[in-house]
Image (cartoon, rainbow, N blue to C red):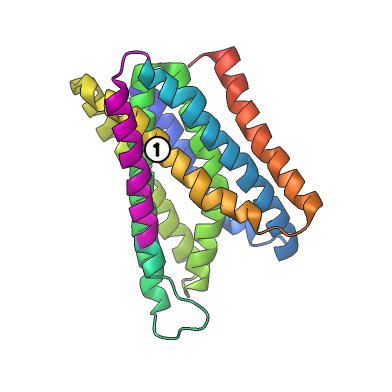
Amino acid sequence: MSPLLAALIATGIISLISLLGIVFLAINKKTLKKITILLVGFSAGALMGGALLHLIPEAAEEGDWDVIGLAVIIGFSLFFIIERLLQWHHCHENEGECDVHTFAYTNLIGDGVHNFLDGLIIAAAFVVDFQLGVATSIAVIFHELPQEISDFGVLIHAGLSRGKALLYNFGTALLAVVGAIIGFYFANQTNEFIDFILPFAAGGFIYIAASDLIPELHKEKKLSKSLLSFFMFVLGVAFMWVVKIFFGG
């Protein structure tokens, strides 16, 4: 299978995940919260495993550690900036000045940029090695599951109809496919792009896991549920380790 076809299939599957939001609307909120927190734990582990067991070691095989370190920092920083831009437009319950619709569209823009970057990263990973592409795609998929549930809920809360929320969410998800096409082109034009994008992706993965997902696990006050969430985190890391051992990459 060609790297481009593999990347298009992977980003196509990831885009379809955005349609799952409407399914979760039928689930009881309490049950949904339990499911989501387990997904968040596993996702954090998968992203950490993807960054530290797959992307950085692959980049280190022939890369310059100064470039790798800088790229990790840039990736970490960019995802921080994207998140801050979204938070600045967030409506807090005790503030009545924010236009909730504005936040919905800002959220879509941020999500679209994020999905585009995912596409770039996945395509570059498949160009380097098929197994690395699979591992990277798996990490992104497990992150997208809880994120898409959240994004769909945000759009509904903003006042959009279910149909529009589903359509807009799917539209931004398709930017991953666009990113894959562009990423494939650049990855084949210059090795410098691959040398940069792999550790850049690792920085983004580490930021999402450490800043977005793990803090959500800390919000759980019951010790038993916290331990279960941590177990899911470890399971996510172990899963990525198994992928590395048995499938390479």
Task: Say how many tags the image has.
Answer: 1
Task: Report the residue at 58% width, 48% height from top.
Answer: 214
Main secondary structure along the magenta-highlighted residues: helix
Q: Quadrant of residue 33?
A: bottom right
- Between 22 and 230, the one lying in front of the other is 230
Hey, which residue is sitting farthest right in the picture? 224
Query: Magenta stretch: residue 78 in it?
Result: yes
Q: Is residue 116 shown left or right of residue 241?
A: left
Task: Report the residue at 28% width, 26% height from top.
Answer: 66
Query: Magenta stretch: residue 216 in it?
Result: no
Task: Report the residue at 56% width, 49% height from top.
Answer: 213
**Would you place residue 165 above or below residue 248 in this image?**
below
**Residue 142's x, y, as percent?**
56, 39
Q: Can residue 59 be seen in this view?
A: yes
Q: Is residue 176 shown left or right of residue 141?
A: left
**Residue 151's x, y, as percent?**
50, 59
**Residue 94's x, y, as percent?**
51, 83
Q: What residue is disc 1 on? A: 203
Q: Quadrant of residue 57?
A: top left
Q: What stretch is highlighted in magenta?
A: 61-84
**Residue 7's x, y, as percent?**
39, 28
- Which type of secondary structure does the marked residue at label 1 adopt? helix
